[in-house]
């Protein structure tokens, strides 16, 4: 296949949006799609949208209900009336669930609230809208095709005399199954050729109509062709009744619907299977899991298990060898999984590099564990493709059948939870779910929910730990440390919530809050103690914030809005940031230095950089990580490590801050090595150093 054939065609998308800000945000989201390329046209008015649609093709419309020339649900009604066949996703600032239901009733594919919009929700809505549109179009074309065929080809006719029990079959009826025209008039010519599984349905449909329980007889069934194959037929008929309401004649027609049935079956297959691997997808897996759950709860199934498999570092393969190689690998893994499990097992690809496995005959946990080990062992063998040996591993979470489960999503959720616990143990691991995992996951979910509301509720605070000049013992500055005053759990430290904030993308928001409010406090100190030398303020920058291109602009706004002297502000970065995109990082740090903001490398020695590499980043201070300071009195070489770091830092004209100073002995040792600053519990416990405490020190 030509490489050009692998490039997806652009999807023509009409965005009807009056707000320039919202339009830019949506376009930015759409540009990040890994699976689609969007050709976006923006219309600010509904009339502009109509003008565009009259002369252009669009495959999808995203519509805001509030426009200058149309308002509310009437906007959607007018658009759908104008172009009924184009799928529409409503995206609006109205937070009205009733309005959402009305929009869906009128024909909108989905209804998204701007206040809750995420890239994942937007792409999921677009995917389902395009998929439903494709299936609907295929079905419509199929129905039109068969309608035209019915006009050109006569149906087979039959006429059954119930008194004589003889049936007239038209030549066309006989030709449908390639029978000779001179067949007998016996009903057996019909019923003996009906598939045994369908015969009860045919007889039931006839009997119900003759008994007056239905106005017409209509039934679909398979009928044996002369060559031994079966073809799908649709029979429709009606009976005549005498004055005693007794049927004496039943007549009707028979249509060959084999092609339609095959189309329906193909569409059903496509809806329920993954197009890449041909494995069942999430829809079919859920259906089979629901069946297993019902059979287990009724005692018809002794037990079952769900295995949730996620590949390790699959993105690395896509990034290094390309998505074609990634797709080939997923196909190869699917085939290898099929060789690892019993024939009755359902293996599904849920999306990306996630697979689910339903073992429907598991009596003891050891059965599921044995299969999990077999799968992980099979994945250890390399896959050869594109002249490379590709090695991959995966982690598996296992959930066993239990009376506590009532819905398929519950057991899938627990298998997924166990899989993440397995990943915490390393690559190529498996883990069996237990209730403690669910409790932990629920606590994490609750923490994430509370965290999203914490800034709005002003639950964060800043504690200030003194930084002391080791040469004269005087206060030199403060480090701002974030604390969360949780309404139920009390005071929480960064270790309790920053990891969750990082995973959910909220860490940069917390950092921005810290910087702005810390700068406000610094400005208060500068104003209140103008006659004295006011200590500097040191604040941490997370990796996420440093990598945001608008950080320098944000810092300019902070300096302008708070009025601080920027030279008294020190921003701390870690070695993990130093190992990120070097060119982008250097530009960001250079712009911060131009504002007269000082930069500090935090926790030096815990990462992978060296002092020699710091020439590229132009920082002002270096912080020695607390474990190195603690090791000065515990290890024979600890003192020399700290001495070497200080000496090399001074060679680079960097000042040094020692973290974790706990004892007078450490103070004296660092002072003798000409270390400029120190902070730690010897000067103040961080949990005591709030704003009032810091102000008292200044006074």
Image (spheres, grey):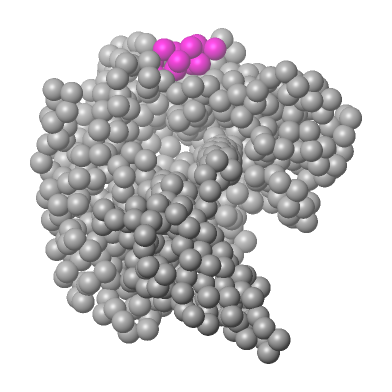
What secondary structure is the magenta-colored segment mainly?
Answer: helix
- The residue closer to the viewer here, 391 or 329, is 329
Q: Is residue 304 left or right of residue 103?
A: left
Residue under the image location 73 percent in, 24 percent down? 53
Residue 586 covered by magenta stretch: yes
Please give the count of numbered marks on the rendered protein: 0
**What residue span does the magenta drawing correspond to?**
581-591
Quadrant the C terminus occupies? top right
Query: Which residue is outermost to the right?
Result: 69
In terms of image quadrants, where is residue 241? bottom right
Residue under the image location 34 percent in, 23 percent down? 579
Residue under the image location 34 percent in, 56 percent down? 179
Query: Which residue is outermost to the bottom?
Result: 244
Rendering coords of residue 566 (x, y %): 62, 19
In terms of image quadrants, where is residue 558? top right
- The residue closer to the viewer here, 293 or 517, is 293
Rendering coords of residue 171 (x, y %): 44, 54
Residue 23 covered by magenta stretch: no
In terms of image quadrants, where is residue 230? bottom left
Q: Is residue 191 left or right of residue 513?
A: left
- The residue closer to the viewer here, 611 or 400, is 400
Rendering coords of residue 331 (x, y %): 25, 39
- The residue closer to the viewer here, 219 or 431, is 219
Is any atom of residue 277 visible in this view?
yes
Rendering coords of residue 597 (x, y %): 56, 18
Q: Is residue 137 left or right of residue 304?
A: right
Quadrant the N terminus occupies? top left
């Amino acid at each position: 296949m030509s490489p050009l054939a692998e490039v997806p065609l652009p999807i023509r998308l009409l965005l009807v949006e009056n707000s320039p800000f919202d339009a830019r945000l949506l376009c930015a989201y759409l540009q990040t799609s890994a699976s689609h390329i969007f050709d976006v046209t923006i219309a600010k008015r509904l009339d502009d949208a109509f003008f565009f649609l009259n002369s252009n093709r669009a495959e999808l419309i995203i519509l805001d209900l509030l426009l200058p020339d149309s308002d509310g649900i009437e906007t959607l009604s007018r658009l759908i009336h104008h172009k009924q066949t184009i799928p529409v996703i409503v995206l609006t600032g109205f937070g009205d669930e009733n309005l959402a239901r009305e929009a869906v009733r009128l024909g909108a594919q989905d209804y998204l609230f701007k206040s809750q919009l995420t890239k994942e929700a937007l792409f999921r809505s677009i995917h389902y809208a395009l998929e439903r549109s494709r299936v609907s179009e295929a079905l419509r074309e199929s129905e039109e095709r068969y309608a035209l065929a019915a006009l050109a080809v006569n149906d087979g006719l039959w006429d059954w005399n119930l008194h004589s029990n003889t049936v007239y079959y038209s030549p066309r009826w006989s030709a449908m199954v390639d029978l000779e025209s001179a067949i007998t008039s016996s009903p057996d010519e019909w019923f003996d050729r009906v598939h045994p599984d369908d015969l009860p349905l045919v007889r039931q449909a006839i009997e119900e109509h003759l008994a007056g329980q239905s106005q017409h007889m209509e039934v679909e069934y398979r009928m044996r062709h002369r060559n031994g194959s079966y073809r799908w037929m649709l029979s429709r008929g009606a009976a005549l009744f005498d004055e005693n309401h007794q049927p004496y004649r039943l007549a009707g027609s028979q249509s060959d619907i084999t092609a339609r049935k095959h189309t329906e079956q193909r569409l059903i297959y496509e809806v329920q299977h993954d197009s890449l691997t041909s494995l069942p997808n999430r829809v079919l897996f859920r259906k089979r899991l629901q069946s297993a759950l019902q059979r287990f709860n009724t005692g018809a199934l002794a037990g079952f298990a769900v295995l949730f498999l996620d590949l390790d570092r699959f993105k690395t393969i896509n990034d290094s060898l390309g998505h074609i190689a990634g797709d080939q690998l997923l196909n190869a893994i699917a085939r290898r999984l099929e060789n690892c499990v019993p024939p009755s097992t359902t293996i599904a690809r849920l999306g990306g590099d996630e697979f689910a496995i339903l073992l429907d005959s598991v009596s003891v946990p050891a059965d599921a564990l044995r299969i999990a080990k077999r799968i992980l062992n099979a994945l250890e063998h390399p896959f050869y493709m594109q002249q490379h040996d590709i090695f991959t591993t995966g982690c598996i979470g296992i959930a066993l059948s239990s009376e506590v489960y009532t819905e398929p999503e519950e057991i899938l959720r627990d298998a997924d939870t166990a899989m993440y616990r397995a990943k915490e143990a390393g690559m190529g691991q498996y883990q069996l779910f237990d209730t403690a995992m669910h409790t932990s996951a629920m606590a994490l979910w609750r923490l994430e929910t509370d965290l999203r509301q914490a800034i709005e509720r002003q639950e964060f605070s800043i504690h200030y730990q003194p930084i002391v000049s080791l040469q004269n013992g005087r206060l030199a500055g403060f480090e701002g440390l974030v604390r969360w005053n949780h309404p139920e759990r009390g005071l929480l430290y960064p270790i309790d919530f920053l990891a969750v904030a990082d995973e959910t993308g909220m860490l940069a928001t917390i950092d921005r809050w810290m910087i702005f409010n810390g700068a406000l406090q610094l400005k208060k100190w500068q104003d209140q103690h103008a006659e004295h030398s006011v200590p500097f303020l040191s604040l941490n920058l997370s990796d996420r914030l440093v990598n945001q291109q608008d950080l320098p602009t944000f810092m300019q706004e902070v300096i302008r809005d708070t009025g601080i002297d920027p030279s008294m502000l020190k921003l701390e970065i870690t070695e993990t940031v130093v190992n990120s995109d070097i060119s982008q990082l250097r530009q960001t740090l250079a712009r911060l230095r131009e504002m007269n903001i000082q930069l500090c490398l935090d926790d030096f020695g815990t990462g992978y950089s060296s002092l020699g590499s710091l020439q590229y980043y132009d920082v002002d201070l270096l912080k020695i990580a607390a474990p190195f300071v603690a090791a000065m009195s515990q290890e024979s070489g600890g003192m020399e490590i700290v001495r070497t770091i200080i000496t090399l830092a001074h060679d680079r004209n960097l000042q040094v801050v020692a973290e974790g100073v706990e004892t007078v002995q450490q103070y004296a040792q660092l002072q003798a090595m000409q270390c400029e600053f120190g902070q730690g519990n010897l000067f103040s416990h961080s949990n005591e150093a709030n704003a009032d405490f810091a102000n008292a020190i200044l006074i």
